Amino acid sequence: MSKIISGWEPAEKRPFQVDLSVAEIHALVNHHVAQTKRCTKYVGNKLLKLSASSVLPNRRESNAYIEEGRKIVEAHIARAKELQSILQSAIENPKS
């Protein structure tokens, strides 16, 4: 049985390792920052649709959207910070 790797959520551990250039690491950092913005916007739109559908929106459902969005955003932020530290060490210690 194969596990599907989602493009929406960053995976905790990848099954392989790849050598990346500084430009590719920088692009990955930008990708994760963009995903945080995308996720926040998506959750906001879901909450707007939820509140527009009824006068008294379901608080439990809106809290679930917020919590799930927060988890995804925190995961992307953590991945971006890790990549930034790798990028910083690559800039400080270039290969000879």
Image (tube, rainbow, N blue to C red):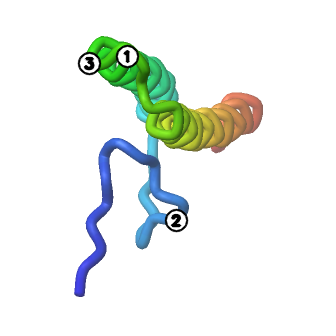
Q: Which residue is mark 3?
A: 53
Quadrant that contains the C terminus: top right
Query: Residue 79: horizontal and vertical position, in percent?
Result: 59, 42
Mark 2 closeness class: few <14, some 14–19, many ≥20 residues within 10 Å: few
Q: Which residue is mark 2?
A: 13
Tell how many labels. Answer: 3
* Residue type marked 1: Ser
In this view, 89 is above or below 33: below
Distance of mark 1 from mark 3, alpha carbons? Answer: 6 Å
In this view, 85 is above or below 35: below
Q: Which mark is residue 75?
A: none
* Residue type marked 3: Ser
Quadrant that contains the N terminus: bottom left
Q: Which mark is residue 51?
A: 1
Mark 1 closeness class: few <14, some 14–19, many ≥20 residues within 10 Å: some
Query: Residue 93: horizontal and vertical position, in percent?
Result: 74, 38
Residue at image position (31%, 46%) is: 7
Residue at image position (65%, 32%) is: 84
Mark sitting earlier along the chain (2/3): 2
The reply to whether dot 2 and dot 3 touch (C-beta < 8 Å) is no
The reply to whether dot 1 and dot 3 touch (C-beta < 8 Å) is yes
Mark 3 closeness class: few <14, some 14–19, many ≥20 residues within 10 Å: few
Residue at image position (49%, 35%) is: 69
Query: Residue 66: horizontal and vertical position, in percent?
Result: 53, 32
Viewer-side residue, 56 vs 72? 56
In this view, 64 is above or below 33: below
User: In the rendered view, does 58 fall on the left or right side of 86?
Assistant: left
